[in-house]
Amino acid sequence: MISVVIPSYNGAETLFQAIDSVLCQTTKTPLEILVIDDNSTDDTMEKMGRLRGNVIGCSSVLAKRSVLLEFPMEKDECHEDYLDWLRILKKYGTACGVDEPLLKYRLSSTGKSGNKLHSAGMTYRVYRELGMGTFRSLYCFACYAVNGVRKYYGKGKKRGRD
């Protein structure tokens, strides 16, 4: 079986187009389509309701269902997925990551990450929501910003061997 994951945030306008593009593929292998909604505020959920299936709260995570149920994504004014991952790590202590993109998605100017300044403010609010004081939050935010700049400007540069 081939599992196709379609992440969505306010993707009501393009949801069925994405599903149709999967269904138009020619394969003898059975297909499974997983539409994953990240707390959309448009009518994505209503359109998904016309489909049969399960709604998952984030786009590229493998985790025990019981853990995700323990940490529902409720803080829409910040990056609630990031907030929950930090809370999960605080409780359980470990996680594994893959340092390569495993999915592509559409960014829109109206999405949560479309405006970088707004997104940065949401990241700062995550630290405050975790109970960090102002200075510690500013320190963590500065680290986040420096790493973001390194990631952005480090793309495309050849790394030399020492």
Image: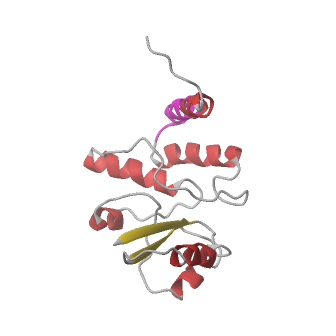
Q: Position of residue 108 (x, y in %)?
A: 70, 59
Image check: 61 left or right of 151? left
Q: In terms of image quadrants, where is residue 141?
A: top right
The residue positioned 49% from the left and 49% from the top of the image is: 129
Q: Position of residue 66 (x, y in %)?
A: 28, 67
Image check: 139 left or right of 66? right
Which span is picked out in magenta? 132-146
Quadrant of the rendering where the C terminus is positioned: top left
Image check: 11 left or right of 95? right
Label count reads 0
Indicate yes or no whether the magenta region holds residue 114: no
Q: In terms of image quadrants, where is residue 10?
A: bottom right
Quadrant of the rendering where the N terminus is positioned: bottom left
Name the residue at the bottom extreme: 50
Which of 6 and 92 lies nearest the eye of the viewer?
A: 6
Q: Position of residue 105 (x, y in %)?
A: 58, 58
When the figure is inspected, residue 58 is found, relative to residue 83, above or below; the finding is: below
